[in-house]
């Protein structure tokens, strides 16, 4: 007879099997549009500019005005404050007015700061962007129509800046097709746009929840997408992650610095543009520029450095050294290549460090501004550069990677509580991935934050202290906030602990406070009484007169988006070029359904563990109603093929994303259509683990059944001989033992009852 332990064993095995299957089949990534608020690590913004900046950008030859003869010798008269046009569009639905207002505020503040700092050689007439070379598949090589377009590229649908954001056609030059000898175009594919008046650079702004927004500490990101003939960026895009614009985490000062940081990348603080920096001069013909040459080099210690005349001069001034060859280290945590940020160890707190700290600990330093000066594209007003305390006067060796091993006020080597080097914050000694093994006191609590307990106040500073009320006890030195006031023209300062009297704090001498045991250590006067500044103070200076059209405008692109569709493929190609895969995908779409190529805008691609997901949009309601069944059937019947690198990949999942239903479409019918004959997936680690567990479970079940069968055989063999039966004895039979077969774990439900949702 089957005993309880055997049932228990079988039950545990089957349960383990089912749990393993569920875990192994669960999705390993969230949808990029799920809107889940990520864990907020406030004031620790990380920049991903190098991960998303385009490898190539098309060039537009702009019309720059020629200076009158009286201005030829004065570049200061020729260069004018940069005119930035901000174009808001493609916001996440619903387009809440408060989101637009926040973007308007932070970008408006950032661009106001930039226009006060940078001057450019102004564009004459409207800014009209060129179309990329990929728009035309064939050009005439000779004849009267030499270099004119004979045929458009099959996959060309318009100009994309980033994340599928399409530059409005009104901002672009037209595209026409020509015959070999025709004097007029045979077809106007795109008419000429009117361009952007009074504009030297256009910034496209949006707030869309993308895959990058799921990552911790990424509030926004940006990229430039168009250059002029001198390689100056003239168009770029900034995307703000909507979850960080929510009231409970949004901080306008912080976001203004984030916007300023990202726009600085667009303007040229980019490792992809360093080698295109120019040496420019104003001549009779206008602006003349030549390549500056190599400005990035690797020193003997393997540190990547940026060296230009203005950068080197600013570094010597900052560190009080006389080495003309000194370059400023660029962050290279991945080793072997530079990035578009300063090395944190050397330039902590700079606006262009890879991690931004609190606004009161972030500085617009002269070294950073000098990069733009030596780009050749800008004239810089250094009056707005802030005094930068980090490493001030420490000598050229401060820029060496081993400087942090020395015992200085800038670095630490313990885990104790202390004070940030500016003594405005209680801090803890710690390191991170950008500090190259060095440790610093990282801010944990700002003493300048006003609260009701009077522990912190606008005039409070941080001191190392072990003060305790007058009782028996002992305390370790740790960071504490005390009220502070500078006296005698900031040559001395006093502190106040709770209700004590003001006590003179003498640097280098411990101070005791009546009514307390322990002591307070006093930092140098120049640290406590330094003139505190903020980048945002520039907003309070006198406005400048810029002849410009309205600073902000809106595109109608977002209103054209009516349906978003996602299609997934099993994918096993190596060294994937996303742009080429997009072209292949567009070809597949247009082969299946007769839609205008400009109607299909690929907004995102995602490749993860052998699954390639395409998200595309801009199909109108009519197009969806006409062609949705065709796409759905093609996926179900394994007829949706993508051809790339001489391989064919089959679509297995088709989804209409649920938050943007087109009116008139039955959502329940078209939410998701899985392919029940899905291709064999790649053997990922999780899949291999699941296979091993499933195999072990099956072996365990088989072993248990074998043991059970053996026991039953033994029991039958041990049955005693039947007694002699007389006619008076009633014969009874033992009931038959029924063994229930285990349920087949591999039963496949019918297609009609299958539903999968994303």
Image: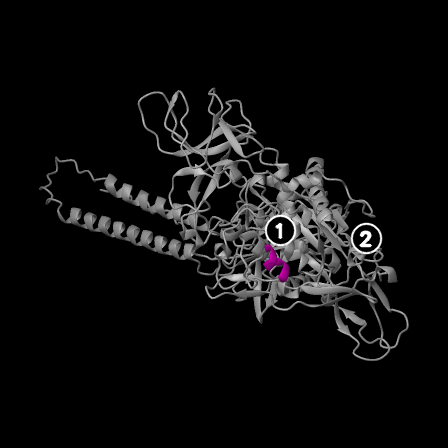
Residue 459: x %, y % from top left: 55, 29
Q: Which residues are magenta?
A: 309-314
| Disc 1 + disc 2, Cβ < 8 Å | no
Gap in angstroms between the C-alphas marked 1 and 2? 32 Å
* Relative depth, front residue between 605 and 276: 276
Which quadrant is home to the N terminus? top left
Q: Is residue 460 left or right of residue 581?
A: left
Residue 637, position in %: x, y? 59, 59
Of callouts 1 and 2, the N-terminal one: 2
Task: Tell which tag, 1 or 2, sits nearer the viewer.
Answer: 1
Q: Name the quadrant containing residue 133.
A: bottom right
Magenta segment main secondary structure: helix
Q: Secondary structure at mark 2?
A: loop
Q: Which residue is identified by label 1? A: 366
Is 310 magenta? The answer is yes
> Image quadrant of residue 307?
bottom right
Residue tagged 2: 196
């Amino acid at each position: 007879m089957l005993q309880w332990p055997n049932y228990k064993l079988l039950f545990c095995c089957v349960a383990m099997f089912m749990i393993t299957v569920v875990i192994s089949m669960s999705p390993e990534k969230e949808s990029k549009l799920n809107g889940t608020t990520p864990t907020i690590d406030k004031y620790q913004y990380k920049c991903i500019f190098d991960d998303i900046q385009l490898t190539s950008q098309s060039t537009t030859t702009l019309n720059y005005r020629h200076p009158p003869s009286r201005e030829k010798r004065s570049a200061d008269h020729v260069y004018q404050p940069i005119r930035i046009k901000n174009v808001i569009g493609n916001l996440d639905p619903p387009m809440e007015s408060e989101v637009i207002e926040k973007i308007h505020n932070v970008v408006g503040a950032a661009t106001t700061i930039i226009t006060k700092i940078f001057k450019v050689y102004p564009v004459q007439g409207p800014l009209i962007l060129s179309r990329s070379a990929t728009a035309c598949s064939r050009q005439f090589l000779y004849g009267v129509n030499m270099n004119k377009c004979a045929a458009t590229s099959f996959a060309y649908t318009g100009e994309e800046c980033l994340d599928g954001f399409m530059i409005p056609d009104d901002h672009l030059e037209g595209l026409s097709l020509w015959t070999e000898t025709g004097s007029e175009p045979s077809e106007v594919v795109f008419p000429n746009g009117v361009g952007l008046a009074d504009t030297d650079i256009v910034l496209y702004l949006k707030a869309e929840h993308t895959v990058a927004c799921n990552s911790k500490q990424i509030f926004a990101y940006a990229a430039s997408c168009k250059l002029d003939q001198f390689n100056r960026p003239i168009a770029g895009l900034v995307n703000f992650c909507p979850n960080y614009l929510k009231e409970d985490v949004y901080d306008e000062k912080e976001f203004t610095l984030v916007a300023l940081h990202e726009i600085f990348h667009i303007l040229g603080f980019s490792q992809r543009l360093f080698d295109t920096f120019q040496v420019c001069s104003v001549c009779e013909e206008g602006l003349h520029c030549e390549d500056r040459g190599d400005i990035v080099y690797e020193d003997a210690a393997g540190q990547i450095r940026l060296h230009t005349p203005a950068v080197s001069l600013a570094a010597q001034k900052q560190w009080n050294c006389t080495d003309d060859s000194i370059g400023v280290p660029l962050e290279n945590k991945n080793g072997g290549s530079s990035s578009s940020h300063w090395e944190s160890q050397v330039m902590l707190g700079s606006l262009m460090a890879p991690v931004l700290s609190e606004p009161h600990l972030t500085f617009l330093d002269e070294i950073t501004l000098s990069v733009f000066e030596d780009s050749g594209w800008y004239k810089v007003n250094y009056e707005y550069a802030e005094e930068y305390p980090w490493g001030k006067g420490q000598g050229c060796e401060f820029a060496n990677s081993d400087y942090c091993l020395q015992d200085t006020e800038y670095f630490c080597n313990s885990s104790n509580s202390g004070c940030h080097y500016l003594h405005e914050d209680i801090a803890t000694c710690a390191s991170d991935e950008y500090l190259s093994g060095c440790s610093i006191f990282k801010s944990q609590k700002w003493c300048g934050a006003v609260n009701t307990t009077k522990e912190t106040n606008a005039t409070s500073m941080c001191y190392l202290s072990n003060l305790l009320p007058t009782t028996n006890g002992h305390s370790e030195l740790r960071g504490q906030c005390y009220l502070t006031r500078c006296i005698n023209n900031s040559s001395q300062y006093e502190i106040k602990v709770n209700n004590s009297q003001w006590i003179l704090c003498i640097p280098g001498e411990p101070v005791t406070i009546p009514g307390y045991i322990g002591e307070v250590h006093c930092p140098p006067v120049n640290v406590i009484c330094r003139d505190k500044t903020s980048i945002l103070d520039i907003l309070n200076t006198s406005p400048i007169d810029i002849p410009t059209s309205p600073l902000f405008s809106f595109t109608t692109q977002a209103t054209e988006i009516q349906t978003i569709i996602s299609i997934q493929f099993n994918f096993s190609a190596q060294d994937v070029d996303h742009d080429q895969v997009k072209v292949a995908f567009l070809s597949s779409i247009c082969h299946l359904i007769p839609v205008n190529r400009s109607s299909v805008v690929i907004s995102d691609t995602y490749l993860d563990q052998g699954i390639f997901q395409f998200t595309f949009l801009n199909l109108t309601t009519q197009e969806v109603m006409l062609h949705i069944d065709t796409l759905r059937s093609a996926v179900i019947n394994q007829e949706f093929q993508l051809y790339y690198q001489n391989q064919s990949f089959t679509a297995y999942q088709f989804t209409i994303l649920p938050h943007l239903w087109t009116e008139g479409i039955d959502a329940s019918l078209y939410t998701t259509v899985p392919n029940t004959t899905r291709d064999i997936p790649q053997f990922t680690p999780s899949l291999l683990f699941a296979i091993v567990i499933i195999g072990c479970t099956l072996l365990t079940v088989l072993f248990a059944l074998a043991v059970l069968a053996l026991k039953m055989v033994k029991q039958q063999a041990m049955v005693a001989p039947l007694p002699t039966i007389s006619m008076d004895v009633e014969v009874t039979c033992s009931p038959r033992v029924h063994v229930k077969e285990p349920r087949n774990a591999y039963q496949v439900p019918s297609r009609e009852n299958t539903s999968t949702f994303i």
